[in-house]
Image: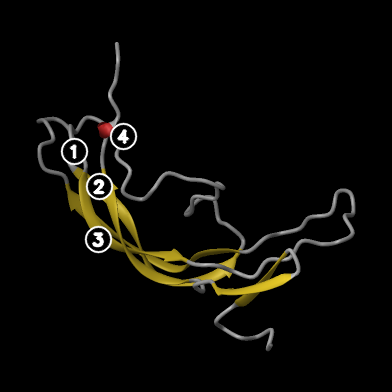
Amino acid sequence: PNSQDPTHLYRTHYLGQTAAFQLPPCQLINQTVSLEKEGCPSCHPVETTICSGHCITKDPVIKIPFSNVYQHVCTYRDLSYKTFELPDCPPGVDPTVTYPVALSCHCGRCAMDTSDCTFESLQPDFCMNDIPFYY
């Protein structure tokens, strides 16, 4: 197989058998995200584009102390921002929310200022207002 193959075909060995499966490459996808703001009672779903998919990563066989190994993740190459006005915000609370719109993606180091770099993050449509608060 060609290592430059854009379909990213991976093989997994399990008890002497080889199973091949295809992973989606890093690309733009449409996603519903929840917009919310402190002081406003509800979330509002909007459609946007985000970066999603798999990037080829390497894990060195020989570990060298204090050496940096950077794993590439699917992240924004270019992005813009849109604004939305949340309904139902009380007087005195600015209802304007700004959210990112991915324009292009690439496999690169995770930029913590624009991306969620955690292993298991909250889903994009997660809403804090949906969690019951107990006094």
* SS at mark 1 in the image: loop
Residue type pointed to by label 1? Asp
Does 123 appear above or below 5?
A: above
Q: Nearer the viewer, mark 1 or mark 2?
A: 2
Residue type pointed to by label 2? Val
Residue type pointed to by label 4? Met
Q: Nearer the viewer, mark 3 or mark 2?
A: 3
Q: Residue 32's image quarter? A: bottom left
Could you say where residue 118 lies in the image, as x and y percent from the top left? 55, 46
| Disc on the earlier residue, 3 or 4 | 3
Q: Nearer the viewer, mark 1 or mark 3?
A: 3
The residue beneath circle 1 is 94
* Residue closer to the observer: 74 or 89: 74
| Disc on the earlier residue, 3 or 2 | 3
The residue beneath circle 3 is 47
The residue beneath circle 2 is 97
* Residue closer to the observer: 109 or 127: 127
The residue beneath circle 4 is 128
| Disc on the earlier residue, 1 or 3 | 3
